[in-house]
Image (cartoon, rainbow, N blue to C red):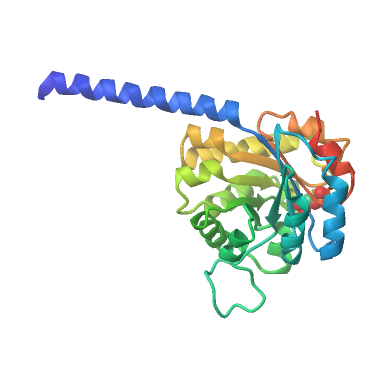
């Protein structure tokens, strides 16, 4: 095929491709299921974990939402056992970026997968602050998680000083751009990002709905810039930082907030109200 005929053929192919992308974008927006995850942090012994899962399991029933309990590594197996037959997914709070070997005290992605884990929090601000994690180690962990088909919940968020100095969006964009280095669009579309302003974590000082929505939208725009609109429309972005039964419904109603990462309130029956926020 030559000349104008060939151009016509090419044009038809391009049109078909763009229709496909538009449809994909619309499907994703329709399909973006809320995801509400608890982050237990360093709380709950294995037996307490079983008790807490048993207490919460009748309260967190909601088919419209993905419910995840991210628990300490030692609690994963008993919590998984206790959550059997429920809608609760058990996730991890961290993992290492190497396959195996001489890394005393670390947990590998294969260990998580073998235990039945599907979600893993990566780069929580407490890991960055107390355990020297950087954007670069976060990126290595994100890549490793995808390699093992684990869904990373990638944390980002600014300090109070950064917010006061007006650099929040620049800072968060930098965290996102490095976290997603060498991540493919297909992988990115399945990721979860948790926007957690550090000054709002564990302080009872929740970001205003406008502040939370503004940054979550900026994160989605950043993903569109790195990849494309379909990927940005697919990726799920949570807000975290003093989420409670009283502020969840307003936060989760925002256009770019697809759920929450919940610390303190995930250890209490209140978590049931957060999961059933509507
Ligand atoms: P918080 O913690 O809900 O207790 O503020 C949130 C988090 O650190 O993920």
In percent of width and height, residue 128 lies at 68, 63
The total of numbered circles placed on residues is 0
Q: Vertical placement of 72 versus 10: above or below?
A: below
Q: Residue at x 59, y 29 (%)?
A: 31
Q: Vertical placement of 106 versus 15: above or below?
A: below
In percent of width and height, residue 248 lies at 81, 36
In percent of width and height, residue 147 lies at 49, 57
Q: Vertical placement of 53 versus 225: above or below?
A: below
**Quadrant of image for the N terminus:** top left
Q: Nearer the viewer, residue 211 or 235?
A: 235
Q: Nearer the viewer, residue 88 or 175?
A: 88
Q: Residue furthest front?
A: 85
Q: Can residue 221 be seen in the rendering of this structure? A: yes
Q: Vertical placement of 263 versus 3: above or below?
A: below
Q: Can residue 160 be seen in the rendering of this structure? A: no
Q: Nearer the viewer, residue 167 or 73?
A: 73
Seen in the image, is 20 located left or right of residue 91?
Answer: left
Q: Residue at x 78, y 59 (%)?
A: 41
**Quadrant of image for the C terminus:** top right
Seen in the image, is 260 located left or right of residue 143?
Answer: right
Q: Residue at x 70, y 31 (%)?
A: 64
Q: Residue at x 55, y 43 (%)?
A: 190
In percent of width and height, residue 277 lies at 81, 32
Q: Nearer the viewer, residue 246 or 212?
A: 246
């Amino acid at each position: 095929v030559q000349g104008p005929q060939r151009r016509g053929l090419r044009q038809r192919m391009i049109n078909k491709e763009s229709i496909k992308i538009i449809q994909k974008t619309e499907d994703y927006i329709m399909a973006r299921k809320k995801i509400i995850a608890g982050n237990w942090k360093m709380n709950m012994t294995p037996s307490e974990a079983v008790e807490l899962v048993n207490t919460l399991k009748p309260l967190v029933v909601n088919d419209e939402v993905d419910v995840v309990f991210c628990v300490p590594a030692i609690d994963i197996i008993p919590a998984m056992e206790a959550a059997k037959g429920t809608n609760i997914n058990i996730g991890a709070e961290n993992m290492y970026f190497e396959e195996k070997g001489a890394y005393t005290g670390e947990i590998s992605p294969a260990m998580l997968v073998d235990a039945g884990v599907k979600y893993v929090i990566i780069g929580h601000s407490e890991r960055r602050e107390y355990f020297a994690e950087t954007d670069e180690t976060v990126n290595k962990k994100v890549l490793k998680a995808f390699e093992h088909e684990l869904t990373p919940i990638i944390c980002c968020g600014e300090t109070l000083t950064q917010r006061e100095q007006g650099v929040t969006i620049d800072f968060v964009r930098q965290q996102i751009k490095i976290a997603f280095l060498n991540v493919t669009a297909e992988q990115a579309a399945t990721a979860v990002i948790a926007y957690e302003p550090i000054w709002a974590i564990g302080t009872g000082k929740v970001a205003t709905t406008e502040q939370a929505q503004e940054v979550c939208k900026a994160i989605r725009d950043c993903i569109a810039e790195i990849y494309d609109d379909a990927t940005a429309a697919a990726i799920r972005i949570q807000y975290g930082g003093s989420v409670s039964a009283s502020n969840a419904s307003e936060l989760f109603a925002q256009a770019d907030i697809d759920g929450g990462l919940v610390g303190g309130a995930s250890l209490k029956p209140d978590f049931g109200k957060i999961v059933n926020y509507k």
